[in-house]
C-alpha cells in the first residue's frame, strides 16, 4: 500500500514510522531538509508525563500517554525513565496538596528523600512528590532519529506535496487551519540554559499559582525551561514570558542565575476546543492533529490508531468523519 | 439586574482564564447560566488579533462580554488596553483593573480613579475593580462610574469575604449603586454570603477554573448565588441571643 504524509513534525514522523512498520510505501512531504524550528515539536519539553498531565488534562491523555515511553524506546530513542519531581516554594505548599489529590500515582518525599533522588536540591525543599512511572527524552534528538531511520528504510522526503492522489495523512499542525476550522494556536514560550553548577537527572515541575515552570535536563549541561500557555497564535518571544520562566528557574535553584542563556524559543501549539487530539477523515485524507502540549506523549498512540484505522477500518474514540 | 441600562438575567459572572480547555469553559457557562463573561485582552492581544481564535470561542458563549484590563499596572497601560478592548469587542463596557501591588494584586486607588475619569470622558462604561474603601467608592462614582466591583479578597486567593464589616458599610453607604463582589471567592457559601448582604452579583474565575470539575463548581456557585439573592429579597430574620421556640410551650401537655 502507498501512503503520503504531509508534515514532518512529531505527528508526521510517528505516522510515517507506523506506516513503514506495516510495510507501506511512504512519501513524506515537508519543506525542510531536516527536523528544525518550523515544527512546533522542535520546541517541546519531551516529558512523557501522562500522570502529571492528568492534573488538568482529560482522562484520555493519561490513558493514551502511558504507552509513549515504550514506543519511543522501541524506536531506539534514548528514553530516561527516572520519573518526575513535583515541587513548590514554601508559601505555595497547598498547590502541592492539590496536585497530590489529583495525581494518584505519586509518592511523597521529605527533604532526605528528595536529596537521595536529586542531590543538588538538598535542603531547598522540605517536601516533594515523585511520580516514578514517568520518563523524558530529548525531542530534537528523537525527531532526528525517527527521520534518519525512515530515510534508511527508504522513505522519500519531498519538499512539495504536489497533487498526487491516494491515502494521505495530513500532519501539518497549525498550518492545517485552512482545512480544520476549529483548530487554534496556543502560544508556548521556552528557554534553554546551560549550567555546570547544577545537575538534575529528571524533569522537575515547580507548581506556582502564577508562574508554573518545568525544567527538563538534557545532555551537556543543558536545561529546557517551559512553558507558557497563552491563548494566542502570536509567535513573538516576549520579555515578560522570558522573565517569568527565568525567575521561576532562579527560585528553583539560584545556580540558574549564573547559567548561560542559550536559546529562547516560541511557537503556537495546535489545539481543538477540548484540547484533545483528533483523527479526522475526509475522503482519502486523514488529519492527525490537535496534539496541543502533548506531542511526544500522544503522537505515538495517535499515529498507531490512525494507521490502524486506515488499514483495518477501526474507529478509535477520537475519530471524526467529515462528509462535507 | 440593570448594569449601565443593560438588563442582565443572571447574577453570576465568570472569568474565562485558566480553564483546562475552551470546551470545559463552555460547559461551565452552560451549567451555570452565567450572564456575563469577562475576558482579558492584554496578554492574548500580542499583535494583529493573535488571540482571535480564543475570542471567537468566548463570543460563541452567547453571553454579554465584559473585557478587562487585567495585568495593567499603570493608568496609561489600562487606558490603552481599554481602547484596544473597545475595538476588539465593539462594546463600551470595560472592567477596569489598575494593579498597585505586585504581591497582593491590590488595586491602585489613585490610578484607578484617574483611569476611570479618562475612560468615562471617552464614553466608556467603567466597571472598576476596587477595594471595600468607602471614600474610594465615592471618588469612583464622582469619576462617572455607575457600577462598583469591590473585592472579597485578593485575586485568586479563594479566601472569601475578608472584611465583612467594610463590605457591609460600603453596601449601606451606596444602596442604589449596583455592586458586584469581584475576586477572592473560593466557595459557593462565600458567594451566597455576598448575595445575602445585598450585593447585586458576584464575579469569579479561579474558584471555578481551577476546581477539579469546573462545570460542576460553576453550577454550585450559580445555585449559591440564587440562594443568597432569594434570602436577601426575603428579608431575613434578625439574629438574637435568646432562644425563641418555634412552637409555643404554653398549653402543652407534660408528664411528671
Image (tube, coloured by chain):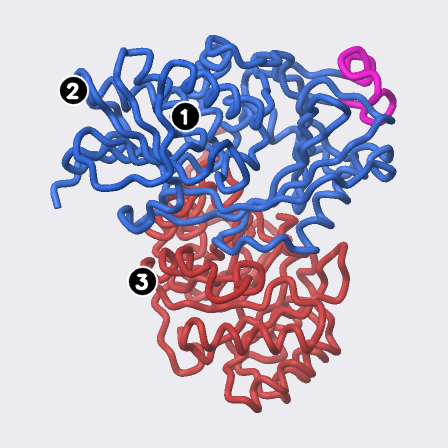
Mark yes or no: residue A172 visible: yes
Residue underneath mark 1 = A13
> Pointer 2 and pointer 1: residues touching (CB < 8 Å)?
no
Q: Is residue B58 above or below residue A67?
A: below
Query: What are the residue bounds of the magenta stretch?
Result: A110-127
Position of B37 with respect to A215 (left or right) is left
Measure the alpha-carbon separation of dots 2 and 3: 39 Å
Task: Tell me which chain the residue with mark 3 is part of.
Answer: B
Dot 2 and dot 3 within a common chain? no
Task: Give how far across and how far down residue A66 sits, in percent.
Answer: 46, 16
Q: Which mark is residue B62?
A: 3
Residue underneath mark 2 = A313
Q: Is residue A124 magenta?
A: yes
Query: Would you identify the image quadrant in which residue B114 lies?
Result: bottom right
> Closer to the camera: disc 2 or disc 3?
2
Q: Is residue A132 above or below residue B92?
A: above
- Chain letter, red: B
Q: Residue B238 versus residue A46: which sits nearer the camera?
A: A46
Amino acid at each position: 500500500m502507498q501512503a503520503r504524509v504531509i508534515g514532518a513534525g512529531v505527528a508526521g514522523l510517528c505516522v510515517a514510522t507506523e506506516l513503514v512498520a506495516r510495510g507501506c510505501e511512504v512519501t513524506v512531504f515537508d519543506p525542510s531538509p531536516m527536523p528544525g524550528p518550523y515544527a512546533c515539536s522542535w520546541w517541546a519539553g519531551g516529558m512523557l508525563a501522562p500522570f502529571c498531565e492528568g492534573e488538568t488534562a482529560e482522562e484520555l491523555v493519561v490513558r493514551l500517554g502511558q504507552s509513549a515511553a515504550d514506543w519511543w524506546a522501541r524506536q531506539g530513542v534514548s528514553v530516561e525513565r527516572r520519573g518526575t519531581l513535583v515541587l513548590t516554594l514554601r508559601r505555595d505548599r497547598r498547590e502541592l496538596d492539590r496536585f497530590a489529590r489529583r495525581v494518584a500515582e505519586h509518592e511523597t518525599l521529605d527533604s532526605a528523600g528528595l536529596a537521595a533522588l536529586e542531590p543538588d536540591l538538598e535542603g531547598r525543599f522540605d517536601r516533594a512528590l515523585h511520580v516514578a512511572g514517568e520518563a523524558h527524552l530529548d525531542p530534537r534528538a528523537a525527531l532526528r532519529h525517527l527521520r534518519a531511520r525512515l530515510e534508511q528504510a527508504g522513505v522519500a522526503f519531498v519538499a512539495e506535496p504536489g497533487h498526487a492522489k491516494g491515502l494521505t495523512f495530513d500532519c501539518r499542525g497549525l498550518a492545517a487551519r485552512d482545512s480544520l476550522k476549529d483548530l487554534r494556536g496556543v502560544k508556548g514560550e521556552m528557554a534553554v540554559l546551560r549550567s555546570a553548577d547544577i545537575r538534575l537527572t529528571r524533569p522537575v515541575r515547580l507548581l506556582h499559582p502564577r508562574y508554573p515552570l518545568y525544567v527538563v535536563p538534557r545532555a551537556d549541561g543543558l536545561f529546557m525551561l517551559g512553558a507558557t500557555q497563552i491563548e494566542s497564535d502570536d509567535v513573538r518571544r516576549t520579555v515578560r514570558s522570558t522573565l517569568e520562566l527565568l525567575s521561576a528557574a532562579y527560585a528553583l535553584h539560584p545556580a540558574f542565575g549564573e547559567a548561560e542563556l542559550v536559546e529562547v524559543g516560541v511557537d503556537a501549539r495546535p489545539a481543538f476546543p477540548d484540547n484533545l487530539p483528533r483523527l479526522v477523515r475526509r475522503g482519502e485524507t486523514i488529519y492527525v492533529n490537535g496534539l496541543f502540549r502533548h506531542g511526544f506523549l500522544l503522537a505515538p498512540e495517535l499515529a498507531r490508531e490512525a494507521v490502524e484505522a486506515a488499514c483495518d477500518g477501526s474507529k478509535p474514540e477520537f475519530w471524526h468523519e467529515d462528509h462535507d | 439586574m440593570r448594569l449601565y441600562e443593560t438588563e442582565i438575567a443572571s447574577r453570576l459572572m465568570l472569568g474565562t482564564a485558566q480553564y483546562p480547555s475552551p470546551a470545559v469553559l463552555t460547559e461551565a457557562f452552560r451549567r451555570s447560566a452565567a450572564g456575563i463573561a469577562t475576558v482579558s485582552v492584554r496578554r492574548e492581544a500580542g499583535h494583529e488579533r493573535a488571540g482571535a481564535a480564543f475570542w471567537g470561542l468566548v463570543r460563541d458563549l452567547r453571553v454579554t462580554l465584559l473585557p478587562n484590563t487585567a495585568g495593567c499596572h499603570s493608568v496609561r497601560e489600562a487606558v490603552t488596553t481599554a481602547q484596544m478592548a473597545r475595538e476588539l469587542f465593539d462594546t463600551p463596557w470595560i472592567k477596569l483593573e489598575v494593579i498597585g501591588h505586585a504581591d497582593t494584586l491590590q488595586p491602585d486607588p489613585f490610578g484607578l480613579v484617574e483611569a476611570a475619569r479618562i475612560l468615562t470622558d471617552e464614553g466608556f462604561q467603567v466597571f472598576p475593580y476596587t477595594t471595600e474603601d468607602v471614600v474610594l467608592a465615592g471618588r469612583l462614582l464622582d469619576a462617572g462610574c455607575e457600577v462598583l466591583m469591590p473585592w472579597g479578597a485578593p485575586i485568586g486567593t479563594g479566601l472569601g469575604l475578608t472584611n465583612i464589616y467594610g463590605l457591609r458599610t460600603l453596601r449601606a453607604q451606596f444602596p442604589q449603586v449596583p455592586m458586584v463582589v469581584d475576586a477572592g471567592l473560593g466557595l459557593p457559601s462565600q458567594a451566597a454570603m455576598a448575595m445575602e448582604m445585598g450585593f447585586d452579583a458576584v464575579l469569579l474565575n479561579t474558584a471555578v477554573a481551577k476546581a477539579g470539575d469546573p462545570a460542576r463548581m460553576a453550577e454550585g456557585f450559580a445555585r449559591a448565588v440564587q440562594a443568597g439573592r432569594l434570602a436577601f429579597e426575603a428579608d431575613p430574620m434578625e439574629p438574637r441571643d435568646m432562644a425563641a421556640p418555634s412552637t409555643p410551650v404554653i398549653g402543652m401537655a407534660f408528664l411528671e
